Image: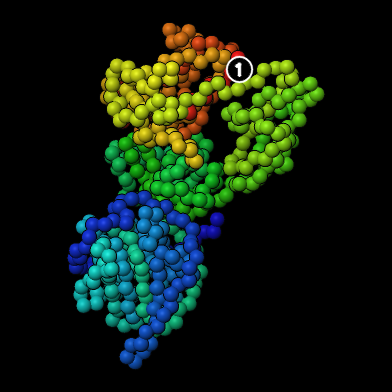
Amino acid sequence: MKKAKLLTMSLITLISLGGLISCGDKSPVEEGSSISSINSTNSSTQDTTSEVIGEQVKEFVVNSSNVFDVINVNLYGFGIKENYSHPENFIISAKNGFIHSVAIKQVKRIQLVAYMSSSINPQEYLKIYNGNNETGKLVNGKNDLGEEDNQCVLTYEFDSPTDEFFILNDSASEVSVYSLKVEYIGEIGQVPEKEFIDDTKVISILEAINKGKELAYQQGTSEEYFIIEGKVSSLEEKQFSISDGTNTIIVYVGSKIEDIHMENSVKIKSRISNFYGTIELVNIQILANDQATYTINLSENCSDNGKVELSKTTCSYNDIVQVTITPDEGYKLYSYAVDGIPQDLPSELTFNLTIEKSILIDVKFALESAKNIVELRRVTFEESEGFVANSSYNNQTPREVGTEGSSWSIVQGNVTSTSAITTEGTEDKLSLQMRTYANTVVPYAEMNYDVNNVTEFLFDAKYKSRAYDLKVYVSNDSGENYRLINKISLSTTVNQYRVELSEEGENIRIKFEIEAPAGGTYARDGQFTIDNIIFRGFAD
C-alpha cells in the first residue's frame, strides 16, 4: 500500500477566532462519529483567475472530488477523510487534523464552505494562520450563509500575501467541508517530499484492550490517539478485527474499506472506545496496509485412496486456484471441507476457487458403494420458516417461537432483527438471540422437533458485550434428556462452528445455553446470536 507522506507540525501557539453563527440542523456527519480513511478519487483541481485592481488573483479550489488527489501533491494533509454519509463533503478530523500549504505562493485569502449545526461551529473549531503564526482574519468580521441552510462561509484574509498557511482542527469534533478556495497571486507547485513522522504512542493490542477496560462502560472513548499493529483476523460490513496471534480487538470503520483483506498486516492510528463492554478502535486512520500472501494447504486425507492437485499453493487476494480431485479406482469423493467446514460436493472434480484467505482443504475418499453425507435440514429463523421478529427478550419462563414442526423454546431471548447474522446477497434479516440480565436466570434455546440420521451439525454464532461461553447440548430421545457435547468461546465477529456426533443419531434435538459466571449472577447487556443451523447426515 502506498504510504502517505505527511508533515509533522511543531508546537505553536494558536489564537482562537471569535464570533457565532446560526444555521440549520441538517447534519452530514454526526459529532463524534467514526469515519475511516479511503483511497483518492480522480478529478482535476480547479484553477481559475479573476481580475483585482493592480494584480491578477488566481483561485485553487478543493472539494470532495479532488481533495485526495491534491493531498501530498499540492498540499500536505493529515486526518483528511471521506464523508460516507454525504459524499459531497470531506472531513478534517478531530484532534489535530490539518491542511498545510507551502507550494501555493502569495496567498491572499482563504474561503471555506463548511457544515454547521447548533452543536458544531466551524469558526470555533478551525484555526487558520500563516507560517509566522499570524491568524487570518474574517473579512468584514462576520460569516455569510452558504447555499444550503446548514452551510456557512468562512472567508479569511492575511495582512500580507503568505507563502505558507495552516488550517487546523484541534477540537474534539470532526468538521465537514464542502469546499476550500485559496486565492493567490503567485504560482502553484508541488510540495517537497517529507517523511511521515508521528510521535503518537505505539501500544500492543493487549495494552489497548486494558486501556479500554479502564474507560467508562457506556461508550467511553480515550482522549489520546494510539498506534496499534496487527493482522486482520475477521471482516464484517462495518468493522474488522486485528490480532497479534493471542489477543484480538475490533476496529470500527462504519462501512467496508475495499482494500482491507484477511491476514493483511495493518498499522492503525485511533482512539480506544468501551462500547458497553466491547473494546473497539474508533476514529481510525490507516497508516499501513500490507497485503497478505495466502497459502493453500492439503490435509493428509487428500492422499488416502486418491489425490488432490492444485494449480498453485501460494497466491494473493482474489487469485484463482484450480483444484483437481482424482479418486483411486473403485473409490469416489466422499466429503470435501474447507477449514473444517463441510462443503457441497462439487459437480465436477476439476473446479476453481477464488482465494480470500489462507485455507486448508480436506478431502475424503470412500468406496463407491458408501452412502454420502448430505444436508438434511437448515434453520435460518426467517419469516419464510414461520418466525416473526420480536423485541421482547426478558422472559424468565420459556416462550415458543415459530410454527408447529419448526418451533423453538427460548428463555431470555427471541427471534430478532437486532444485530442479526446476515449473509451478503441474501434476504437474511432475522436470527435467534439470547440475552443476559442482572439475575441468575440461565438463557437457553432448544428445538421442539426431531431430525433423524444426523452425523453432524453446523451453526453461525457471535456475542456482544459479555464473553460467556456457549454450551451445546444434544438429545437423542426427543428432548427428554440432554448431554453436554461442546462448550464454545464465541467471538464478537461471526464464526461457523461444527459439532460432530460419535455415531448416526435418531430423534436428535439440540439446545444452546449461556454458561453462568462464577457466583451464578449474570451481568446485563450480553447478547448471543445464533443462525443458519445445518443438520447433515445420511439420507433415508
Disc 1: CA contacts within 10 A as few (<14), some (14-19) or many (>=20): few
* Circle 1: element type: loop
Extreme residue toward the right, this view = 329
Q: Is residue 536 visible?
A: yes
**Residue at image x 38%, y 22%?**
402
Residue 37 % position (x, y) = 44, 55
Name the one closer to the observer, 220 or 19: 19
Q: How many marks?
A: 1
Q: Position of residue 249 (x, y in %)?
A: 43, 40
Answer with left or right where residue 494 lies relative to residue 175.
Answer: right
Q: Is residue 283 above or below residue 137?
A: above
Q: Position of residue 108 (x, y in %)?
A: 33, 80
* Residue 96 seen in render: no
Residue flagged by tag 1: what amino acid is it?
Ala
Name which quarter of the figure residue 401 lies in: top left
Residue beneath the point at 54% across and 43% down: 262
Counting from the top left corner in percent of width and height, residue 494 is at 46, 34
Q: Nearer the viewer, residue 364 or 147?
A: 147
Q: Quadrant of the N terminus?
A: bottom right
Q: At x 51% / y 48%, what residue is drawn?
A: 260
Judge whether 469 appears above or below 173 on screen. above
In this view, which residue lies farthest toward the bottom? Answer: 54
The picture quadrant where one finds residue 104 is: bottom left
Q: Which residue is mark 1?
A: 539
Instruction: Give the answer, above or below, for where 4 lies relative to 513.
Output: below
In which quadrant will I find the C terminus? top right
